[in-house]
Image (cartoon, rainbow, N blue to C red):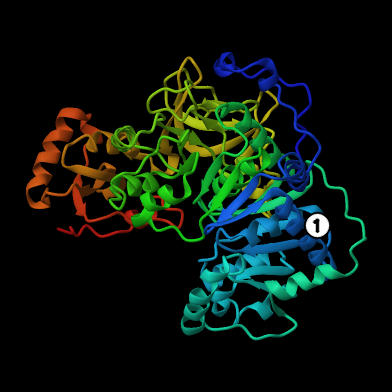
């Protein structure tokens, strides 16, 4: 499905336009590919760093040679335009090299979590009709029993040590030999080093032309309905995202660096922390395995200019105690996305930043895979406390009544809908779900129905209120868990709170609060105090029916609070 973005349609009300120039609002996407954008960077910034991996530095001129050689190797393996290749790798250089090399051919990259279970990998390979798989070598056991039931012709195994400094390779190799099963050396299973040999012949054959409308990437997503799906994105989405972020992050300069903690199989990581920096002359610091307990040490050693992550990542930062003299004076941007940043955590992070000489304050952004990660962003002086910013240049957001599609008045909660030139083509082989997510409204525009709740103020700032599916309807009253969580987290004893629905005989459902206490507080004495606190600060129907004390909250693979697990969890306290 390819949408016509250029037909004459009704003008979309945009109170945020005053913050942008006309040229920024009317941003035009050039007819190029991801590879073309990076190739341009390699010419402009050839002597600048492109990425740093575990201390090993690679400049743009060497990076593009690796990409070009890999493109020849992929082509000589038989990969052609339109083929789907699954990349199942952590944040290693080979993941980026493969992405751009395959994009040069016109192949489509299916980005898959390397920690996916055996059945998840098999299902993704089958559903995307992947012909080739690029996979981390230590997880051979996840495919050895299922690969023959897929369409995969060849598996290229990458080692985390392939791009390491020589002195680091030996200890890693020893651990791998002892701990992991090694794949057999056959025609079907080859190493990255053997793969590179395919670049030494048939080098002069021409590559196809690929433009902004060529399908480029498949992201695996829960979608707006929560069911696993494959989001198909064109080159245009990544090109636009990079252009938008360059426009708004005005303090970023050539040679600045972005800490690449967010994974490449997620739109936030692939687009915002990897492709965008590489397209504007910055470099990305690739982190293949993140240790939250050593976050401060990582920052001290890598000295990033911009840090992006989810709320739990910043919780880890302020709880890190390894570097007492950590200096964050060089950090220009601290951006949070992927989940709601509570007021409590925002205040604690800003206090931490101030104590460590950082002139910046944490800001929030908002996006989802179906619109390629970044849709709105608070930046520099364009910010309001608690907001997820304003739409990026060329993007449009409106808040609607999900039942009637009518636009909600300013400051009233409704469903967040998005219109952007970065919209997905659709969910792969899933027309029904695509049509539910992408809908043509009376204004003639195609809008993505996000399933998220939010409100917009008169200046166009958006405030995220959580998922529609998380909304609790108790005796006919709407209860927004994100708001209840924010109020409870203002209690001096509470470190973190998550609110879910629990069934009730006559109210149908009521809120239940899972609480993580700060050090020094005990659950036996706090529950009654929390109830009284809620009575003073919340409307009656918002007060949690039950409080459960936990040492920590379950997390998803992306580090978000796993609400589904809590929904089905028991009520046993961990005291």
Q: Badge 1 local density, few (<14 within 10 Å), some, or many (20+)?
A: some
Query: Which corner quadrant holds the N terminus?
Result: top right
Side of 432 relative to 101 (left or right)? left
Where's residue 404, x and y in %? Answer: 53, 28
- Left/right of residue 214 with respect to residue 99 in the rendered view: right
Left or right, 122 with reference to 42: left
Q: Nearer the viewer, residue 212 or 508?
A: 212
Residue drawn at the location 61% of the way across and 79% of the way down: 146
> Where the C terminus falls, by quadrant?
bottom left
Residue at 26%, 45% in the rendered image: 496
Task: Give the number of marks.
Answer: 1
Residue 22 left/right relative to 78: left
Tell me residue 31's x, y (percent).
Answer: 81, 37
Asked whether residue 40 appears in the rendered view, the answer is yes
Q: Residue at left 50%, top 74%?
A: 172
Badge 1 marks a residue whose secondary structure is loop
Q: Is residue 211 above or below residue 143?
A: above
Q: Is residue 478 visible?
A: no
Q: Residue at x 66, y 24 (%)?
A: 442
Q: Residue furthest left?
A: 525
Q: Which residue is more in the foreground, 145 or 429?
A: 145
Give the answer, above or below, for where 425 lies relative to 178.
above
The residue singled out by tag 1 in the image is 82
How far from the left and from the top, in percent, is residue 221?
56, 52
Q: Is residue 136 above or below residue 291?
A: below
Image spot of residue 557 (x, y percent): 45, 58
């Amino acid at each position: 499905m390819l949408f016509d973005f250029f037909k004459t349609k009704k003008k979309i009300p945009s109170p945020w336009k005053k913050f942008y120039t006309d040229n920024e609002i009317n941003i035009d996407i050039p007819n190029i590919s991801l590879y073309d954008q990076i190739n341009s960077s390699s010419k402009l910034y050839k002597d600048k760093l492109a990425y740093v991996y575990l201390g090993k530095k690679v400049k743009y001129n060497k990076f593009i040679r690796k990409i070009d050689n890999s493109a020849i190797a992929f082509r000589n393996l038989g990969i052609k335009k339109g083929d789907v290749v699954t990349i199942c790798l952590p944040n290693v250089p080979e993941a980026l090299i493969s992405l751009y090399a395959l994009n040069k051919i016109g192949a489509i990259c299916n980005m898959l979590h390397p920690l996916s279970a055996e059945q998840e990998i098999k299902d993704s390979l089958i559903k995307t009709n992947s012909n080739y798989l690029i996979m981390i070598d230590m997880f051979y056991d996840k495919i050895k029993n299922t690969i023959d039931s897929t369409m995969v012709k060849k598996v290229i195994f990458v080692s985390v040590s392939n791009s390491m400094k020589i002195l680091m390779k030996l200890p890693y190799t020893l651990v791998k030999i002892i701990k992991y099963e090694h794949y057999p050396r056959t025609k079907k299973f080859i190493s990255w080093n053997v793969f590179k040999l395919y670049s030494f012949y048939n080098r002069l054959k021409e590559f196809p032309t690929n433009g902004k409308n060529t399908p480029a990437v498949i992201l695996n997503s829960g979608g707006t309905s929560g069911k696993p799906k494959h989001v198909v994105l064109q080159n245009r989405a990544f090109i636009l995202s990079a252009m938008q972020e360059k426009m708004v992050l005005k303090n970023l300069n050539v040679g600045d660096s972005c800490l690449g903690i967010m994974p490449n199989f997620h739109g936030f990581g692939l687009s915002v922390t990897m492709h965008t920096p590489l397209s504007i002359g910055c470099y990305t610091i690739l982190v293949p395995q993140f240790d939250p307990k050593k976050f401060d040490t990582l920052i001290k050693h890598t000295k990033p200019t911009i840090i992006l992550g989810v709320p739990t990542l910043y919780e880890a930062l302020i709880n890190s105690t390894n570097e007492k003299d950590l200096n964050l004076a060089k950090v220009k941007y601290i951006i949070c996305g992927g989940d709601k940043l509570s007021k409590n955590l925002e205040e604690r992070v800003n206090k931490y930043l101030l104590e460590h000489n950082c002139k910046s304050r944490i800001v929030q952004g908002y996006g989802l895979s179906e619109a390629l990660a970044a849709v709105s962003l608070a930046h520099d002086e364009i910010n309001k406390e608690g907001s997820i910013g304003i739409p990026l240049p060329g993007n449009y957001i409106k808040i609607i009544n999900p039942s009637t599609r009518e636009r909600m008045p300013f400051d009233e909660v409704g469903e967040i809908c998005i219109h952007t030139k970065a919209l997905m083509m659709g969910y792969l082989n899933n027309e029904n779900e695509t049509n539910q997510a992408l809908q043509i409204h009376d204004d003639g525009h195609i809008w993505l129905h996000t399933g998220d709740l939010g409100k917009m103020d008169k200046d166009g700032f958006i405030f995220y209120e959580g998922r529609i599916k998380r909304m609790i309807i108790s005796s006919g009253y709407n209860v927004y868990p994100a708001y209840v969580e924010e109020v409870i987290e203002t209690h001096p004893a509470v470190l973190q709170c998550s609110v879910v629905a629990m069934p009730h005989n006559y109210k149908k459902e009521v809120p239940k609060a899972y609480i993580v206490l700060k050090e020094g507080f005990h659950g036996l004495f706090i529950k009654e105090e929390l109830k009284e606190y809620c009575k003073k600060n919340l409307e009656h129907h918002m007060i949690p029916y039950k409080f459960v004390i936990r040492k920590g909250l379950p997390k998803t693979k992306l580090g978000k609070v796993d609400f589904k697990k809590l929904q089905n969890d028991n009520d046993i306290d961990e005291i």
